[in-house]
Structure formats: C-alpha cells, structure tokens
Amino acid sequence: MGGYGSGPTRCPKTAAEDTLTLSIFDLKRLGVLGKDSRTAGSLSWSSGSSISYSAMVYSAGYPNIRLDFSCRGKSITQEIQLTQTTLASGGKRWWFLCPVTFERVGKLHFAGSPPRFACRKAHNLTYRSCQESRRFDRLHAAIAAQLGTTLADVKRTLKG
C-alpha cells in the first residue's frame, strides 16, 4: 500500500486548441450562412487539414451544413443542424446544434472515437490555459509551507 505508482493516475484532458475547430463565425465570414442559400466549398486549417462542405440554409425548415471529409483513409459525411436566435438589435445570430448534446454552440471540435465534429462538452475537452493554471501548485504549496503562509498568499505575491 502506498508504493510507487499506487496513487491516482492523472490522464490529462485534450485541449480544445489541439483539435480542428469549426466556427460558426468563420462560416458567416465566408458567406456560407445567408438567406435561403445553398453553397459548397472547402475549409482548411493551418495544420494542413481540410474538409469540403455543402450548406443548405433555409429560413423555413431545418437548416443544416453537410461536411464531407476523410479521416485515417475513411470517408466520413456528417450533417450538423443550424439554428438562429434573434438579437435585441433585431438581427439574427447563427449557432450549431451539437450532434451529441443538442446544445447551441458557436464552435465544434473534431476529436473522439469515432472521430466527428461535436462540442467541447461532448468530447470532454478543456482549454490549455485551464491545464496550465495549476501547473505550479505543488511548488507554491512547498514555498507556502516553508514560509508558514498560505498557498493563496504565495500566489498573490508572485502575481504582484
């Protein structure tokens, strides 16, 4: 009991920044989202990955975007439903409906097994900044113990 390796194993979560991210704002900027439109094109990321899409956006009915892409030599097609909310200014804002959680989201991430686009919550992703924010807690706790103060005091002193 209590020997080497007997403690809890910590499996860090994947960071959202390490996935391919599909943003509703990018689609809007590209002119994919408009009134009763049907459009097709491709999206690419700085990593060199790319996907082709066809969007069928209708003001009446169920607007969606169809993504066709290849992953590990396998062709994948995924349809994602879109929705709108009305802004106080009278305008409209587009959202994805996550195909897993059915929540409105502005970004979808490509991850998981089987690989697909879904929201951060569905893939159990975190942000890199969240992972790094507690990186030095052990060191700060040791300093606090030596100084006879609290962890919060040490962190506050180091920030200031």
Image: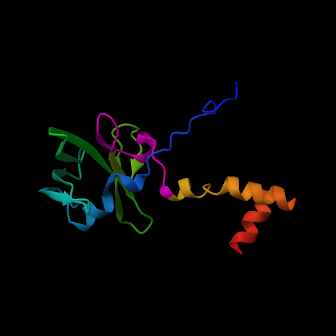
Where residue 156 appears, x then y in whole percent? 74, 68
Query: Is residue 11 toward the left or the right of residue 118 in the image?
Result: right
Please tell me whether residue 112 belongs to the stretch shown in magenta. Answer: yes
Question: Would residue 56 be counted in the magenta stretch?
Answer: no
Question: Where does residue 152 sit, x and y in percent of width and height?
Answer: 77, 60
Give the colour scheme of this rendering.
Answer: rainbow
Q: Is residue 75 above or below residue 27?
A: above
- Please determine whether, in this image, residue 40 is positioned above or below residue 97: below
Residue drawn where x is 32% and y is 54% of the image: 21
Q: Give residue 40's quadrant in the image.
A: bottom left
Q: Is residue 150 visible to the viewer in this orientation of the structure?
A: no
Image position, residue 48 (x, y; %): 21, 59
Q: Quadrant of the N terminus?
A: top right
Q: How many marks?
A: 0
Residue lying furthest top: 1
- Of 58 and 147, the residue lying toward us: 147
Residue at x-position 85% and y-position 62%: 147
Please give left or right for residue 55 compared with residue 138 in the image: left
Q: Residue at position x 26%, y 63% from top? A: 46
* Frontmost residue, 131 versus 141: 141
* Region in magenta: 111-128
